[in-house]
Image: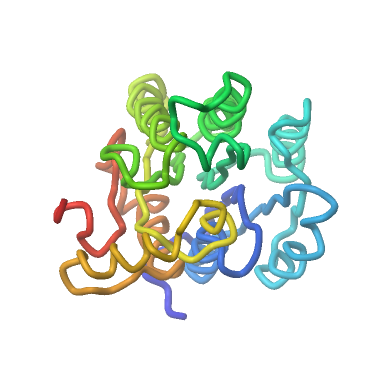
Amino acid sequence: MSAVVDLAGKRGLIIGIANESSIAYGSAQVMRDAGAELAITYLNAKAEPHVRPLAEGLGAPLILPCDVREPGQLEAVFAAIGETWGKLDFVLHSIAFAPREDLHGHLVDCSAEGFAQAMDVSCHSFIRVAKLAAPLMTEGGSLQTVSFYGADRVVEHYNLMGPVKAALEAVVRTLAVDLAPQGIRVHALSAGPVKTRAASGIDRFDELLNKVQERTPAHHLLTVEQVGRVAAVLASEAGAPLTGSVTYADHGFHITA
């Protein structure tokens, strides 16, 4: 795969690789091919055998556990980056979670506990990432999180995650203002539906894919590599004028509603 932008000399953290079909992995591949050195996280011991070979294939010098629900794990990731590199240029945050019973029901029926957990993992963790990354971004940098069109419009079966992603996009705008004096850009990368393990948790996801393909102007579905090319641009100097907004990588699906 040829490089689409120049990330030579840059160091980045990728949070959220689960397997080779992950948006985070597609992005990591493009970023590595563009010259970046990467630190990679995996969720837990169960996930490690699936993620470690991918991270090793990317030449990652840091392969670290990171469950944002576990106290101290996110902090340990940034401590290791500080000790090993002493600086950081970009972060891609591509994690989301909601308990299945809350995700598959109507929003009005979701539990307070389930809503709080979805917000903590999918949204507040990005604020924590920003706070920990900022001291390492001594020459400015880029923070990205992955959103979805369901943040802006009601998408059938997306349920609880719609308000959660809407909150995440609001967080991006506020962080962009907070961190601008440090030269740190903040982005929401709104990807169209992609067949990933995380997406499979959405009820009747195959039906959603079919509807999206029908309504997308050129009737194309997205690949994780295509999302990755956009993420690489946002992490590069080419993305320097961009901050605080939602960048859609969805073949134009969002304009057809």
Relative to 211, residue 72 above or below? above
Q: Residue at x 38, y 30 (%)?
A: 172
Q: Residue at x 80, y 58 (%)?
A: 48
Relative to 138, residue 174 above or below? above
Q: Is residue 62 visible?
A: yes
Residue 235: x, y in percent?
Answer: 42, 50
Please give left or right for residue 179 compared with residue 18 in the image: left
Q: Residue at x 36, y 31 (%)?
A: 166
Please give left or right for residue 84 compared with residue 180 in the image: right
Task: Give 236 or 150, whichever is nearer the viewer.
Answer: 150
Task: Give 244 or 252, whichever is nearer the viewer.
Answer: 252
Residue 37: x, y in percent?
Answer: 61, 59
Residue 65: x, y in percent?
Answer: 78, 46
Q: To which quarter of the image does residue 159 belong? A: top left
Q: Is residue 5 visible?
A: no
User: How did the renderer colour the structure?
Assistant: rainbow
Point out the residue furthest to the bottom here: 1
Task: Give 148 or 98, whichever is nearer the viewer.
Answer: 98
**Count of marks overlaid on the render:** 0
Relative to 91, residue 2 above or below? below
Please give left or right for residue 240 compared with residue 64 in the image: left
Q: Residue at x 73, y 48 (%)?
A: 43
Residue 38: x, y in percent?
Answer: 62, 56
